[in-house]
Amino acid sequence: MPPPALSTPDAPPPRKGVIGRCAACELSIRVITHTPPTVCPFCRRRLQTEAFDPAPPTPEPPGVLNGVVVHRYRKFPRWLNRLLVTFSIIMLAIVVTMKIRNLEYFWYQPWVNTYSICVGVFILSRFLLAAFYTAPADVGYEPTVCVAVACRNEEEAIEKTISRIYREGYPHAKLEVVVVNDGSTDRTLQDMIRAQERHPSLVIVDFIRNKGKRHGMAAGALLAKNDVLIYVDSDSFLMPGSIRKIVQGLADPTVAAVSGHTDVENVDVNMLTKMQDVRYFVSYRVMKAAESLFGCVSCCPGCFSAYRKACVLHVLDRWLHQKFLGVHATYGDDRSLTNYLLKDYQVLYDDEALATTIVPEHWHKYVVQQCRWKRSWVRELLFAGRFMWHKHPVAAISWYALTVLPLLAPLVMFRALVVFPLTTGHAPAFYIAGVLVVTLLWGLYYLERTGRPHWWTAFVFMITYVFFFSWQGYYGLATMRTTKWGTR
């Protein structure tokens, strides 16, 4: 009698995916291991579902294997750091001296001098307040989180963005990821599907036609099952440990949102990307750090920010259908959402929650981006101005100063650089010297903190701001009804 055959364990059944479609909202939701939704997140109609067989997973995209990019700051020797700090203090003393001298000659150019003194006080106060900034403490808070990514035409980056989220290190049992394809015309959707084959818990939402980033962000919020909602741009990449760090601020129930810190991923491409790296760093480590002392960060950027989901859902309908001058708002989504939450909650900044992002590499795209940002800034200052006076007095005064001063800047610069020389025959040496000293201070601060040698591009930014970008506020105000994104 032959021996009984040895039993073998059953092979795991092949994975089956599900696609749910809503004809009314022109969207589909694609899942593999995630529990498929039964109704549309927007209209609540029942989804029409069909099964599909996922393809075998392919290798990770370049830039994900062999670890992730490290935070590329360089440490100077202690003596050089001290030298830079000493020199920066000297620059601060020069700025103070020049402002005092402004008082001596105040009535020669009262409007220009008033503006110059206010700008000097504002800048010095930012550095002073930022010096007292500390990141939210790590209290061991580890909530369930949903990372949402909304994008259109991002075939060059979206796979890497998704893979870096999954390799960031947060426990996968507490992590869900939702990506939204907003009517892309390139291979973005195919790249998302390829990423889902590697990471079957990924949820893909596909809008048949372009609805706008705000609808993509809303889809992530409506589909999220977890407690904390983290928005990451489709061309941004998380550093290890960044999710665990950014959620620590939300352990405080009075905090509704936390901005992470973002550096430029493609910093080494050209002078423009280097200039933006300096600008990003200073805007985060000085401006947001100063605002965070009072829980009044005015904008949580889309690159990398965390929100308490319950707070977002509370304002979601108003934010999603926001109108300005009778036109639906289609840009400035991040600043707008921040303002809706800042009205009743604290908003913080965490400089230890790190990410990088791809910035424009050509001047045309950069100009269009800045104009879009300026329009949203003008629109949102009219909204936030109605409640900011309720905040801490220092935060309120600083916010209103940051609102008024940039609007006056072009007129003051024209008066100082054009009208004054023509009417007096003298060069505006004092005004130019003040601008150069302040710019040098920004650059040295960046150099001391990062060790990166392109600190000098701070001067490139200042020159372009004085002669071009400062005027964009007026252009943005004149074109507020424009709804085009411009860079997609």
Image (cartoon, helix red, strand yellow):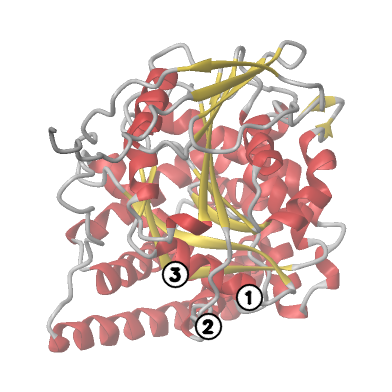
Q: Residues within 10 Å of mark 3 (few under 14, many from 20)?
A: many
- Judging from the image, what secondary structure is the residue with disc 3 in? strand
Asked if the residue at tag 2 contacts the one at tag 1, i.e. Cβ–Cβ closer than 8 Å, the answer is yes
Q: Using the numbered discs, state the Cα–Cα distance from disc 3 to disc 2 in whole angstroms.
A: 16 Å
Identify the mark nearer the N-term, 1 or 2: 2
**Label 1 belongs to which residue?**
251
Label 2 sits on what residue type? Val
**Of 376 and 3, which appears nearest the observer?**
3
Q: Which residue is located at x 29 percent, y 73 percent?
A: 449
Numbered tag placed on residue 139 in the rendering: 2
Residue 181 appears in the figure: yes
Q: Nearer the viewer, residue 7 or 108?
A: 7
For label 1, count other residues whose C-alpha is less than 10 Å away and answer few (under 14), some (14-19) or many (20+).
some
Q: Quadrant of the N terminus?
A: top left
Residue 230 percent coordinates (x, y): 56, 52
Label 1: which secondary element: helix
In the image, taking residue 424 as reference, residue 477 lies left or right, namely right
Pinpoint residue 288: horizontal percent, then vertical percent. 54, 66
Disc 2 element:
loop
Cα distance between the residues tagged 1 and 2: 8 Å
Tag 1: amino acid: Ala
Q: Nearer the viewer, mark 3 or mark 1?
A: 1
What number is the disc on residue 351?
3
Q: Residue furthest front?
A: 1
First along the sequence among labels 3 and 1:
1
